[in-house]
Amino acid sequence: MKTAVYPGSFDPITNGHMDIIKRASRIFDKLIVAVVRNPNKVSTFTVNERMEFIRKAVAELPNVEIDYFEGLLVDFMKSRNAQVIIKGLRAISDFEYEFQMALMNRKLDPNIETMFMMTNYKYSYLSSSVVKEIGRLGGCIGELVPDVVLPDIQKRLTGLK
Ligand code: PNS
């Protein structure tokens, strides 16, 4: 059974993430969306909130699981018996950082492969930071985040003004 992990902050999940999740879930037997818990990075949404948004958004994808991890991604991969890391690439600006992480992860564990998926062009401008900025300032984030979690995310962001 081929298991892939799609790791990230997902603070919050966007339609760009959803595009990668849907496409990767068609390729692997199981896809684990893994939310990072990083005590050194300030996040807007708690790990539980981020996982709950993802859970709602992927409810109709039977081979997608949601989990969280702290520490090294390769250790989490081992603990879940997963072989492939999925990463989305939006633009050349993503490449250098992702390239470094992929090589570092391979050095840490040569058995783990990183696979990159190009984002759908519709989402090449989209990021969680942009969603937060627009939402906080009262702009419309419809079409940027999954419909099923739009009211929850919008409400939380408006409250942060
Ligand atoms: O959505 P993000 O913030 O770009 O995700 C980054 C993430 C979580 C994939 C990355 O920071 C990560 O893998 N963190 C775990 C710590 C780790 O394994 N570091 C070594 C990788 S070189």
Image: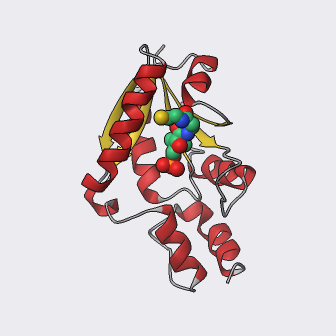
Residue 102 lies in quadrant: top left
Residue 41 lies in quadrant: bottom right
Residue 152, given in percent of the width and then of the height, sits at 68, 68
Q: Quadrant of the C terminus?
A: bottom right
Scheme of colours in the image: secondary structure
Please, is residue 31 above or below residue 93 in the view? above
Q: Image check: 47 left or right of 23?
A: right
Residue 149, given in percent of the width and then of the height, sits at 61, 62
For the point 56% across and 85% down, which residue is it?
137
For the point 51% across and 84% down, which residue is it?
139
Q: Image check: 8 left or right of 96?
A: right
Report if residue 61 is visible in the image.
Answer: no
Residue 130, given in percent of the width and then of the height, sits at 47, 70
For the point 48% across and 13% down, which residue is it?
1
For the point 46% across and 50% down, which residue is it?
18
**80 or 71: nearer the eye?**
71
Residue 159 lies in quadrant: bottom right
Please, is residue 65 above or below residue 55 in the view? above
**161 or 107: nearer the eye?**
107
Residue 16, given in percent of the width and then of the height, sits at 41, 55
Report if residue 42 is visible in the image.
Answer: yes
The mark tally for this picture is 0
Please, is residue 100 above or below residue 81 in the view? below
